[in-house]
Image: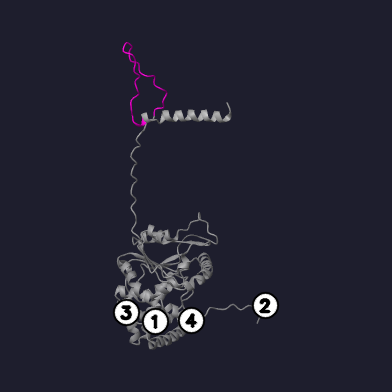
Amino acid sequence: MNIKDAFFSIGKKIDKIIRELFGEEKKNNQPTPIVSTPVNQPEIAATPSRKRKLEFVESPEPQQRPIKKSRPSIKLTNYSNENKDASFKARWSFFKSHTGGYVRRGVKGYNHFDLILGEQELYGKNPANYGELFLGSLPEKSRGMFYLPFIQHNDHLKITQAGKDIHKPVKLIIDCTQLPEKKPRNWHNPVQPKDWQEQGVEEIINIPANDHGIGKQKEQEHVKTLYPFMTQYFPTISNALANKKSVYIHCKAGQGRSAFTTLCYLVTGYRQLIGVLPTIGNLFNEGKTEEVMSVIKEAFTLMKEKHKQTTIKLTNPITLQEIIEFAVYYSKNTGKKPEDYERLTEKETNRIKEIAQQQAKNLRDQTPEEPTLKVVSINSPVS
């Protein structure tokens, strides 16, 4: 027998076995055939062949998994508004701000975030019946020059836990960064909206401000574009605080943009919330410059005491001008629809600029200068 015949006989045997196992008799569920015999002999059943019995066992019904209660979807307000021109600048300045923030927090003992509105009174009102206002930097899950996923910081858990400890949970986030700054990169892993959602945050409002733009002359036109955003969304902050929900305002390092936004809210929306009159806009129109400065300095002092790392300075005439400009802008447009907002007139802008320059100069004159260290050579004679 050659190889061809051997393979042929093997194939026939395999085919026979397959027919016996999966033949038509098994498919039709027919009984084993009975071989007919002569009448004088008893009927003898055919010898059953060695067939494998195929038993079909019904699989049990799959158990239903417990349905997880999904959290309500988080609301992202103005989150798609990206200043593309600031993308490169955001990446370029990120390392500077972040490393500087780490050094200041490590050397000077600054906190990642601080409670601004808590037990301390502001404008003679007790804020116990309202939610809390936190101010800080961009929360991150892990960070470092080349962040390691297993070294977790989970800043957002600390922030939300701070709200739970005082039974006023954090429900609103005011994000003052550009979208490129929130993308995970080699040196940081910032908290994303889904992370806030897991902690019960209901809404994130984005006020896209340029980094290092507050108090800079070349950035003044950009800062003016933020006035409509703050005017539109400050009532949302007030509603959250009125319902005993805490609010977290942050930028990248928690020193410039978020501090400016917080200060602007304290002198406008918060005064309106607790019912303190008159507004800065009315005081400005009445020519009461000293009263305007008194309101701003009281709010600034509170914020500076609570959040020491802020870079906002009232001695900077441009910063002071931007604060007064927004306060007057807010008074003119609060309660209106965004499409009906009125811009400041040139006369109002020039008058605010003059007031800011004069008041900033007065503050600089009142601030004592830091003593300078006189370096004396060893070889020089002592007088």
Gap between marks 2 and 3 measured at Cα: 67 Å
Q: Amino acid at mark 4?
A: Gln
Residue 159: quadrant of the picture? bottom left
In the image: residue 255, left or right of residue 345: right
Mark 4 highlights which residue?
217
Tag of residue 340? 3
Gap between marks 4 and 2 measured at Cα: 41 Å
Contact between labelled residues 1 and 3, with CB atoms less than 8 Å apart:
no
Q: Indicate the secondary structure of the residue bearing disc 1.
A: helix
Residue 354: quadrant of the picture? bottom left
Q: Which residues are magenta?
A: 26-53
Q: Amino acid at mark 2?
A: Ser
Nearer the observer: mark 1 or 2; the answer is 1
Q: Amino acid at mark 1?
A: Glu
Q: For the C terminus, give its image quadrant.
A: bottom right
On screen, residue 236 above or below 1:
below
Gap between marks 1 and 4 measured at Cα: 14 Å
Nearer the observer: mark 4 or 2; the answer is 4
Q: Amino acid at mark 3?
A: Asp
Instruction: Tell which circle, 1 or 4, labels the residue nearer the N-terminal end.
Output: 4
Instruction: Tell which circle, 4 or 2, labels the residue nearer the N-terminal end.
Output: 4
Nearer the observer: mark 3 or 1; the answer is 3
**Residue situated furthest top in the rendering:** 40
